[in-house]
Image (spheres, helix red, strand yellow):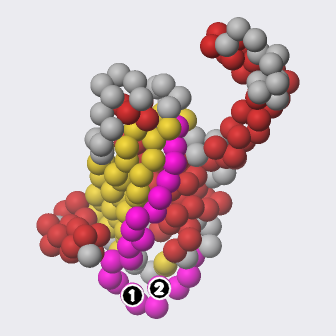
Amino acid sequence: MVTREEAENAVKTLLGYIEDDVTREGLVDTPARVIKSWDEIFAGYKQSPAEVLDSTFNGEGYDGIVLLRDIEFHSTCEHHLQPFAGSAHVAYIPTERIVGISKLARIVDLHARRLQNQERITKDVADDLEEHLSPLGCAVIIEASHGCMQCRGVKKQNAIMTTSAMRGVFFDKAEARSELMQLIRD
């Protein structure tokens, strides 16, 4: 494991690649600030899905769609270390147990706060819902804009990437998918 001091020195080395004078006033504390910010940005490595989805409640027979939409998130692309951000829509149809709605936002954040790609966040959130809630179905749809496309490479400012994972009845039944999409659009 790399120590905090080693990490700060690595940042200082990278700053030296960009800027000739890493000792100037504006940069002297930058390595420590970067590592402190990374502690927050990449906090998802310090949590497990089981911790987030650990407390469930009796669903009391509810068998409709549970949807939390427009969950804003920020993540970091593992390919270029550029930010990407957007909204996630997370849905499931409970069997016996439900989870508090904040847990749906927290599971998105857990995965977003790691070096990532959008496809993996989408898949992993759906996998976690399946494993920990055993729903009739679950769905995750993520829409995001990517800094690696906006400030470098093709430089497309308004491009939005959409990914989805449909499981159970959301995959098997067109009616369930259709109802979900209507709820997201409303």
Would residue 155 be counted in the magenta stretch? no
Position of residue 23 measured from the top left corner of the image (x, y, whole percent) = 82, 16
Query: What secondary structure is the magenta-colored segment mainly?
Result: strand
Q: Secondary structure at mark 1?
A: loop
Dot 2 lies on which element?
Answer: loop
x and y percentages locating residue 179 in the rendered image: 21, 74
The Cα–Cα distance between marks 2 and 1, rounded to whole angstroms, is 5 Å
Decide whether residue 69 is among the magenta residues: yes
Q: Nearer the viewer, residue 69 or 125?
A: 69
Question: Residue 100 versus residue 186: which sits nearer the camera?
Answer: 186
Label disc, if present, on residue 150 of the rendered structure: none
Position of the C terminus by quadrant: bottom left
Of residues 124 and 160, the one nearer the viewer is 160
In x, y percent, where is residue 20? 70, 8
Residue furthest front as drawn: 25
Q: Is residue 137 left or right of residue 6?
A: left
Task: Residue type at mark 2: give it.
Answer: Gly
Q: Is residue 135 above or below residue 44?
A: below
Q: Residue 83, how many percent across, how many down? A: 50, 38
Residue that label 2 marks:
59
Residue at 34% over, 84% down: 63
Does residue 176 appear in this view? Answer: no
Asked if labels 1 and 2 touch by Cβ distance under 8 angstroms, the answer is: yes
Residue located at (53% from left, 29% from top): 81
Q: Which residue is mark 1?
A: 62
Residue that appears at 30% across and 25% down: 154
Quadrant of the image occupied by residue 6: top right
Which amino acid lies under the numbered mark 1 shown in the image of this protein? Tyr
Q: Which residues are magenta?
A: 56-76
